[in-house]
Amino acid sequence: MTRIRRFVLIGVVAIAAAAAGYGVNIWRQTGGTQAAETVLATRLLDLDGRPQLLNQWRGKVLVVNFWATWCTPCREEIPGFVRLQEKYAGRGLQFVGIAIDRRDKVQAFAREFGMNYPILLGGFDTVDISRHAGNRVGALPFTLILDRSGQIVGIVLGGLKEAKLDGMIQPLL
């Protein structure tokens, strides 16, 4: 890669990152509270077929992860989520996975990965909830972090490293 091409690429990435940060800031100011209420009002079935309302976990630091069994970055980040749930459950952390997939596949996946937090089942229409919460492209994985009062304080599109998430949630516990 030539120097000029590398310089242009770095410039484009910097501009895109700045625009994304600005967009998240505007979103937080204008629609973050409404988006949080929409997420918390979501009712989905768990793996046993029982309806669960996300609002039941208000008062905890809530990490809501939209994922699928066929999503490679999802498969990579979930072991870290399992470790963090175990590490901080006693301090008020609650992960909730929203799987955009079939129940049988999700059940097998959950067993394989030792998932130790609630998993809810959603269809492709559930991606609209993530869009309302800031996932403009509707991609997976998508993770929301809500504080104890139910406000969205973090959104991450794409794979999330355990150390980064740990740093994001520790101040909230």
Image (cartoon, rainbow, N blue to C red):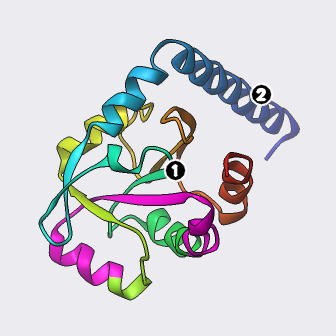
Q: Residue 100 location, x and y as percent?
A: 26, 57
Give the camera-side residue of 125 and 44.
Answer: 44
What's the magenta bit mostly, secondary-structure-wise? helix
Disc number at residue 111?
A: none
- Secondary element at image label 1: loop
Q: Residue 120 location, x and y as percent?
A: 26, 60
- Secondary element at image label 2: helix
Residue at image location 34% in from the left, 38% down from the top: 40
Residue at image location 74% in from the left, 54% down from the top: 167
Q: Residue furthest bottom?
A: 112
- Image: 101 above or below 113: above
Q: Is residue 111 left or right of residue 154?
A: left
Give the camera-side residue of 134 and 88.
Answer: 88
- Image: 110 above or below 59: below
Q: Is residue 162 left or right of residue 152?
A: right
In magenta stretch: residue 102: yes
Specify the segment rendered in magenta.
83-110
List the residue tagged with mark 1.
Answer: 60
Residue at image location 28% in from the left, 42% down from the top: 127
Residue 19 falls in image quadrant: top right
- Mark 2 or 1 closer to N-term? 2
- Image: 163 above or below 39: below
Question: Which amino acid type is marked by label 1?
Answer: Lys
List the residue tagged with mark 2.
Answer: 11
